[in-house]
Image (tube, helix red, strand yellow):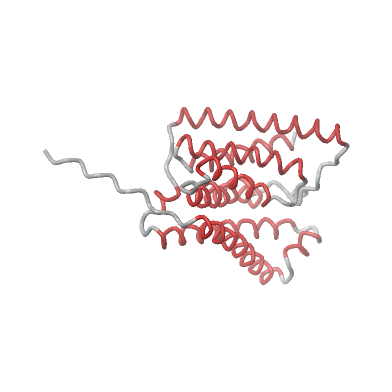
Amino acid sequence: MNAAPPEAAPPVPYGPWATLGLTVVIFIGAGMIASGLVGVVTGRGVQDSVAGGDTNAMLTAMILSGIIGTAMTAELVHLRAPGRVADYLALRWTDNGTAWRWSLLTVGYLFLALLVDNMARVSFDVVSPHNPLANAAIGPLFLLATLFVAPVFEEVLFRGFVMEGLSPTLLGQSGAITIAALSWALLHSQYDVITMLLLFGFGVLLGVARVVTGSLLLPIVLHAVFNTASITLSGL
């Protein structure tokens, strides 16, 4: 009988500083390229378009930024670990039962977050921040941006690339989860401190799901579930 082939050693990730530096480059670079492309097509900047009521420009920029950022991340991972992008980013699925349990936990967290958000705003007399997409029509661009592109890009970058680069350090998995969640929450700077704290909590949940299941595809799905539930509840 032939012996089973030995399992390949896990790919060696970028170091912590390289990981954080490249993350900034990916996020800013993808955003600048996307905004530039939208500006060339529309003849004005994304912010000017949004100020003029054209939310489609913002949605288009979000979609382009997500696609470009995901491609940049995959290419950088390929340069570090040729042919092993899926291994590096843990692009594998877990079992369906686990996925359902985490999905229910995600919806439960959303209800808890909404309750805490409401109680905090009543207690401290804080007005909810303006959502730049509040006036956007829920059409193909909106759904593509919020339910597919954003979850894929943000999870690949934060729960994939960032956590993979930080987990082998002295920070460990707990530190990697925390920094990835904090970075992701700060990404949503259009919101106030209350909302960003609640997003930080959800980022921690996503990071724990990534570590416990060994799957990045699950956090991507959970992120999409969270956005879907948020959009559904906001329309009630």
Percent coordinates x, y for residue 88 in the rendering: 42, 51
Residue that appears at 64% across and 28% down: 108
The residue at 24%/44% (across/down) is 6
Viewport quadrant of the C terminus: top right
The x and y percentages for residue 128 are 82, 42
| Drawn side of residue 174 relative to residue 196, left or right | left
Q: Residue furthest front?
A: 170
> In the displayed structure, would residue 235 be above or below residue 32?
above
Residue lying at the far left of the rendered structure: 1
Taking depth in this image into account, of 161 and 227 the one nearest to the observer is 161
Q: Residue at x 71, y 33 (%)?
A: 113
Q: Nearer the viewer, residue 60 or 25?
A: 25
Position of residue 43 measured from the top left corner of the image (x, y, whole percent): 72, 72
Residue 103 lies, with reference to residue 83, above or below; the image says above
Q: Position of residue 222 (x, y in %)?
A: 56, 38
Q: Tell which residue pokes out farthest to the right in this image.
A: 125
> Quick check: 89 above or below 37?
above
In what quadrant of the picture does the N terminus appear?
top left
Classify residue 28 by image quadrant.
bottom right
Q: Is residue 91 left or right of residue 47?
A: left
Residue 18 or 77: which is nearer the viewer? Answer: 18
